[in-house]
Image: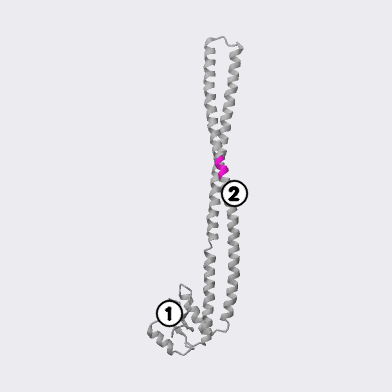
Amino acid sequence: MQADPFAQLRLLDVQALDSTLRRLEHRRSTLPEAAALDEQTVRVAELHDAAGRVETELADVGREQRRLEGDVETVRARQERDNTRLTSGAITNARELDSLQHELETLTRRQSDLEDQVLDLMERREEMEGRLSGLQASRTEAEAEVLRLSQARDAAHASIEVDSAAAVTQRDDRAAGLPEDLLKLYDTIRAGTGAGVGAAALRARRCEGCRMDVSGTELARARTALPQEVLRCDECRRILVRVTDSGL
């Protein structure tokens, strides 16, 4: 294949812009702000779930506390009723009196047990409310960080879009007028390489595509080749463009 030497040099400009676009795309897909945002979003969800579990536990404890407090009130009412009977002098039968006193002792123990359970539940509620408050504060901080990271990610995306649009415009400008067969070969080679490089300069007797020194045989052929002949690197098969410091 043959192409004007100046067209081959312009192909290096196209390659440079394609490499810039590739770097910008890689940056877009690996933004640290996006990765941090994903992590922080997961953290918000985890904190939300944890707070929800504590709220459910608090509701259960609250119901149990209210039930026990109701039992305490029932016991107290029964104690008051028995004390009233005991002090009224209406009971004269010794057996009935002993039974009533025994019931009062039992009620007193029952009340003490119930009040101890209520106190335990109140302590549990206090600990859980403190835990819930901490989780809610952490979630608020995490949500603020999600907002900050979202804004940072969007700003980074916008900057990349501006740079990409500029590079595309320049790329189209440099590619305009290049021989169709040269561009087709270049695009084919680019698509077949993992690095996305289809053309490289021959500089200081080295291919800048694969970073390998060009063999003596290939250098001799490059020296005698017509300026318009399109050279290929023997190692990586990329288009090899001769420049002023090729070392020929």
Mark earlier in primary sequence (1, 2): 2
Rendered-image quadrant of the C terminus: bottom left
Above or below, comparing residue 181 to residue 78 in the picture: below
Q: Which residue is mark 2?
A: 140
**What residue type is disc 2 on?**
Thr
Relative to 213, 42 lies left or right: right
What secondary structure characterizes most of the magenta part?
Answer: helix
Q: CA–CA distance between discs 1 and 2?
A: 57 Å
Above or below, comparing residue 2 to residue 117 in the picture: below
Q: Is residue 23 magenta?
A: no
Instruction: Report x, y in % for residue 242.
Output: 47, 84
In front: label 1 or label 2: 1
Above or below, comparing residue 20 to residue 205 in the picture: above
Instruction: Report x, y in % for residue 141.
Output: 58, 50
Q: Nearer the viewer, residue 248 or 125?
A: 248
**What residue type is disc 1 on?**
Arg
Residue 24 image-quadrant placement: bottom right
In this picture the colour scheme is: one colour
The residue positioned 54% from the left and 38% from the top of the image is 127
The residue positioned 57% from the left and 49% from the top of the image is 139
Q: Nearer the viewer, residue 202 or 121?
A: 202
The residue positioned 57% from the left and 24% from the top of the image is 75
Instruction: Report x, y in % for residue 81.
Output: 60, 19
Instruction: Report x, y in % for residue 213.
Output: 40, 79
- Mark 1, Cα crowd under 10 Å, few <14 / some 14-19 / many 20+, is many
Describe the element under mark 1 as helix, strand or loop: strand
Q: Which mark is residue 206?
A: 1
- Magenta-drawn segment: 130-134
- Mark 2, Cα crowd under 10 Å, few <14 / some 14-19 / many 20+, is some
Q: Are dots 1 and 2 in contact, CB under 8 Å?
A: no
